């Protein structure tokens, strides 16, 4: 079955329909990621037009940081032009009560919540020659123990401690999916505060595996209260569970928001690069995908390709005996493309001897 070529062959109705399904990939980039990636909340003093414009510019910088993985977005000509008219990049906004983000937060604090348009933001990122951090980024688990007044407590999901909520907020600000442990009975027996304090990483990896999470953060800190202010001193570590080669950042005398921001920045800077595509040369990678035996599988495979915002174009050249031959246009190198395509297990790399003229992959539902 040939697309985009002069060919007079006659195809079955089934194959023709399959071709139409996959053709949609050429016009679509990634499927819509979760709302949190493109929805930003900024604190404002009032609902004036001036305040909205200022907050919208800050919100655009935040969403660009999430999408690119960069802690600081370069102010090149494309970015400066976008910041002059941020309204071109969002579809809706609403004023609401703050969720506690930012220094002016409080029960009566006002915030501007903006929903940005994914396609417009991605086009801006490409025009500005900035990297793209794949939106299908995996979850990280944060194991954090705080010692205060001689007592050690592990932050858990649903904790009312200020640091727990602040850490999740700062992770969201950086585009880092982050969870805290449930600390149910099973987990409480396996992971006591001393395990986190003693930095027993293999035990923490075992406890994290029940969630299917392969990225961990470990925070160990002492809290001291001075009047109405609580300051923290300690360290953050981040590591991939499969290699346990952590990097560490020490800190002293920081507020909850400063500690949370430091941890989120450290984790994003460590976990983003393996899933980041940098602008530059454009590549056309030939793939041979096996195991596609019916229309339903073909449709699911085409949907799978739509989630990758770094895939600019997919062109099917032929379908024969359960093998789909296609060309993927992307700025990702072959190694990075294969790493991302096979990360979730639905596509698996086959022995190169199976086919010599293309990268061989097998589709698995």
Image (tube, grey):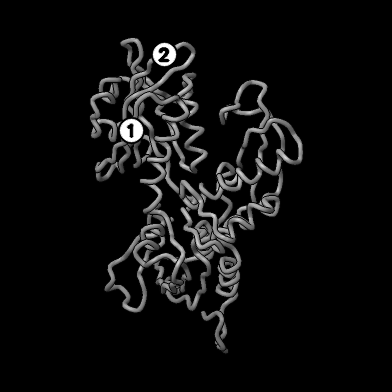
Which residue, given by chain and number where applicable, does mark 1 sit on?
Answer: 236
Of callouts 2 and 1, which one flags the residue occurring earlier in the amino acid sequence? Answer: 2
Question: Element at badge 1?
Answer: strand
Circle 2/circle 1 CB separation < 8 Å? no
Q: Between residues 327 and 319, which one lies in front from this camera angle?
A: 327
**Residue nearest the observer in this picture, 122 or 56:** 56
Q: How many neighbours does mark 1 have within 10 angstroms: few (below 14), some (14-19), or many (20 or more)?
A: many
- Report how far apart the C-alphas of labels 2 and 1 lie in the structure: 20 Å
Q: Can you tell which quarter of the image residue 52 is in?
A: top right
Q: Is residue 144 above or below residue 42?
A: above
Residue 127 lies, with reference to residue 11, above or below; the image says above
Q: Nearer the viewer, mark 2 or mark 1?
A: 2
Q: Which residue is mark 2?
A: 225
Q: Position of residue 299 (x, y in %)?
A: 54, 62
Q: Quadrant of residue 198?
A: top left
Residue plotted at (36% across, 58% down): 339
| Residue 45 visible from this viewpoint | yes
Left or right for 237, reference 41: left
Give the residue at the far right of this rendering: 48
How many callouts does the rendering have?
2
């Amino acid at each position: 079955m040939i697309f985009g070529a002069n060919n007079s062959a006659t195809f079955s109705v089934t194959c023709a329909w399959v071709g139409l399904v996959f053709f949609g990939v050429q016009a679509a980039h990634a499927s819509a990621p979760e709302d949190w990636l493109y929805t930003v909340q900024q604190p404002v003093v009032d609902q004036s037009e001036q305040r909205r414009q200022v907050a919208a510019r800050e919100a655009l910088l935040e969403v660009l940081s999430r999408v690119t993985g960069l802690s600081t977005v370069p102010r090149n000509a494309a970015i400066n032009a976008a910041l002059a008219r941020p309204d071109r990049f969002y579809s809706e906004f609403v004023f609401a009560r703050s969720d506690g983000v930012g220094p002016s937060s409080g029960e009566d604090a006002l915030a501007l919540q903006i929903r940005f348009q994914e396609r417009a933001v991605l086009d801006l990122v490409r025009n500005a020659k900035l990297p793209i951090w794949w939106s299908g980024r995996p979850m990280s688990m944060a194991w954090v123990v705080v010692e205060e007044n001689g007592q050690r407590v592990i932050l858990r999901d649903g904790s009312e401690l200020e640091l727990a909520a602040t850490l999740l907020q700062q992770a969201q600000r950086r585009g880092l999916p982050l969870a805290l442990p449930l600390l149910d009975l099973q987990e409480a027996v396996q992971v006591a505060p001393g395990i986190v304090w003693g930095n027993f990483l293999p035990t923490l990896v075992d406890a994290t595996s029940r969630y299917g999470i392969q990225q961990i953060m470990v925070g160990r800190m002492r809290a001291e209260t001075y009047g109405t202010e609580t300051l923290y001193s300690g360290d953050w570590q981040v590591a991939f569970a499969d290699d346990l080669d952590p990097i560490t950042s020490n800190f002293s005398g920081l507020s909850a928001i400063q500690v949370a921001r430091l941890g989120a920045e450290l984790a994003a800077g460590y976990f983003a690069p393996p899933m980041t595509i940098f602008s530059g040369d454009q590549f056309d990678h030939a793939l041979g995908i096996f195991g596609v035996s019916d229309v339903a599988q073909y449709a699911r495979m085409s949907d799978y390709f739509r989630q990758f915002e770094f895939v600019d174009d997919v062109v099917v050249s032929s379908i024969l005996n359960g093998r789909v031959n296609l060309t993927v246009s992307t700025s990702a190198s072959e190694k990075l493309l294969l790493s991302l395509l096979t990360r979730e297990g639905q596509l698996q790399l086959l022995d190169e001897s199976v086919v010599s003229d293309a990268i061989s992959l097998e589709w698995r539902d």
